Amino acid sequence: MSKRIGILTGGGDCPGLNAVIRAVVRKAIPSGWEVLGILEGWRGLLEGKWRLLDLEAVRGILPRGGTILLTSRTNPLKHPGGMERLIENYDRAGLDALIAVGGDDTMSVAAGLQEAGKNCVGVPKTIDNDLSGTDQTFGFDTAVSTATEAIDRLHSTAEAHQRVMVVEVMGRDSGWIAVACGLAGGAAMILIPEKPIVLDQVTEVLRRRHRRGRIYSIVVAAEGARVSTEGEQAHVVLASQKTDEFGHVRHGGIAQVLAGEIEKRTGMETRYVILGHTQRGGSPTAFDRILATRFGVAAVEMVEQGRFGRMAALRGRDISSVPFSDALATRTVDDELYNVAATFFG
């Protein structure tokens, strides 16, 4: 009887997912494994949706964004008998192991399935780069490159109209994308969730630049950045009060709020741009293709070596692995990196 590995991609899509799938298939099949692609993340295992993946199925997918397996934010533990159904379908699919590709939510379900006695390994994925246990996740480099290119383009139009441009990027609980693209793109100010800020501090930086003859400014804000006025508590701006199945509310709209307040308080013409899902889409960078490929190969090796209940991780230049428990906390922006960026505020 053939040995069989399952693979699923959960949570938000991310450039590099297809590179992981390709690497798993290309590594596993020559070693005698069958690879079963679970469709639509945990929803697929919950509902019994899957298909066999052969070498032809992954041909040409390395540079493609998205995921050929599709994805969802389904939390099976929020469904009646969810864990029991996962176990039943794991067995029905004839799996010897499951590779779960995703962020902390995906890893938390994989950890639960492992505790229930089913072999699981993880591959870290999030454009936000906020997954603990690994130095970097694939997709982050692509998101930063996309956002930096957009900021580069905004410099010219901001200068032509002598405007302040507020650029909103992804980052619900951490500001890795904002700090990286703001630093690379020469932002006058960067706002992130880890560093609550009073609005007057932002406007003072912009006024100071204006007094020095700088006729335009770029402000970068993570969607989860916390801003306050004097005497009030810093808070985030929510696009919706609804939560997904993992309990997350949808952030968004801070750029619009900031732009209005900046213009009102400084008199400077201000516009905003929300980059949104453009950061998720498109072809992954070379760095992300390589990192995702290394993670996929490592995941198969972990299965072959029986190192279950663990997630592949980048440590320095090496790929190692960490227990699922190490991947379930949010990884916040390093003070050192933020302080480097802050050197250029104003």
Image: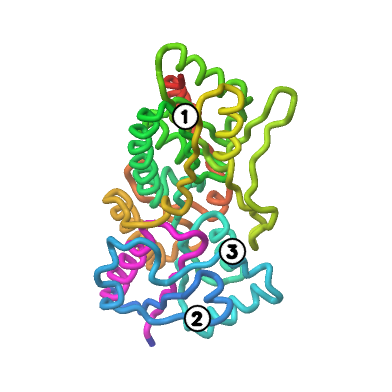
Tell me the residue that label 3 is attached to: 109
When the figure is inspected, residue 18 is found, relative to residue 35, above or below; the finding is above
Residue contact between numbered discs 3 and 1, judged by CB atoms under 8 Å? no
User: Which of pointers 2 and 3 lies earlier in the amino acid sequence?
Assistant: 2
Residues in magenta, as a range: 2-30
Q: Quadrant of residue 86?
A: bottom right
Q: Quadrant of residue 2?
A: bottom left
User: Which mark identifies residue 262?
Assistant: none
**139 lies left or right of 44:** left
Crowd class of label 2 (few under 14; some 14 to 19; many from 20; radius 10 Å): some
Q: Position of residue 334 (x, y in %)?
A: 49, 32
Tell me the residue that label 1 is attached to: 164
Q: Nearer the viewer, residue 296 or 18?
A: 18
**Looking at the image, which residue is at 39% across and 57% down?**
281
Query: Which secondary structure, mark 2?
Result: loop
User: Which of pointers 1 and 2 lies earlier in the amino acid sequence?
Assistant: 2
**Looking at the image, which residue is at 51% across and 24% down?**
268
Nearer the observer: mark 1 or 2; the answer is 1
When the figure is inspected, residue 103 is found, relative to residue 153, above or below; the finding is below
Q: Position of residue 107 (x, y in %)?
A: 54, 59
Q: Nearer the viewer, residue 8 or 266?
A: 266
Crowd class of label 3 (few under 14; some 14 to 19; many from 20; radius 10 Å): some
